[in-house]
Image: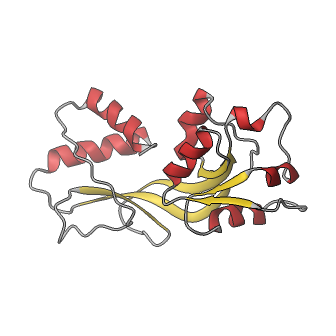
Amino acid sequence: MRWLLPKLMQLEKTLPEVQVALTTTTGHGVSFKTEPFDAAIVFGAQNRGGDALFEEALTPVVSAALAGDAPLTLDALSRFTFLHPTRDKTDWTLWLSQQPPPLPVMRKNQHFDTMDLAISAAIQGFGIAIADVKLVEEDLRAGRLLRPFQESVKTGASYRLMTREQPDDAAPLLAFRQALLTLS
């Protein structure tokens, strides 16, 4: 939603005749044969079809108030609550595995069901989140979040736009597809 909503707002201005109705799920697949959707944005490592929107690249983010004035070091991260976008520590573990020792110790952890929830918690100063660079672009630009390290790590997963092969009225779907690919 962090990436899509600004794009939909731009789409409404350029193509007001295209009506978009959103449905969200934490499941990352869609079956156009059994579901009434014309398009879906899916996330995953195994997705090969459709149009690539962007690859997931993770980096730590923190609110300015929580970060303080001094530059953050890897070792200093141990004092924060680590905000995880999933029920495991996979994303943080992947990012930390690409950093030089000594690595911080994840003493305090909070797990969320979505990356959006972890990012929102970071904005509110609850801890330091691991987030997709694309999904926090606007928060970084607006100063709601800081990116204390320039390093990011690709996960091998991506966001892809999948569309129904033969929709009833192809013109709006084609316009939606083209707009999303242009605005990406």
Total number of numbered discs in the rendering: 0
Vertical side of 179 occupied by 141: above or below: above
Where in the figure is residue 13, as x and y percent of width and height? 28, 26
Farthest-out residue, right: 102
163 and 145: which is toward the camera: 145
Farthest-out residue, left: 168
Residue drawn at (19%, 38%) of the image? 18
Where in the figure is residue 32, as x and y percent of width and height? 21, 67
123 and 157: which is toward the camera: 123
Residue drawn at (71%, 53%) of the image? 81
Residue drawn at (35%, 61%) of the image? 50
Vertical side of 143 occupied by 21: above or below: below
Where in the figure is residue 74, as x and y percent of width and height? 84, 52
Where in the figure is residue 119, as x and y percent of width and height? 56, 46
Query: In the visual, does 25 lie left or right of 43?
Result: left
Q: Which colour scheme is used?
A: secondary structure
Residue drawn at (21%, 48%) of the image? 173
Query: In the visual, does 3 lie left or right of 10?
Result: right
Vertical side of 88 occupied by 120: above or below: above
Q: In which quarter of the image is residue 4?
A: top left
Quarter of the image for the C terminus: give it. Answer: top left
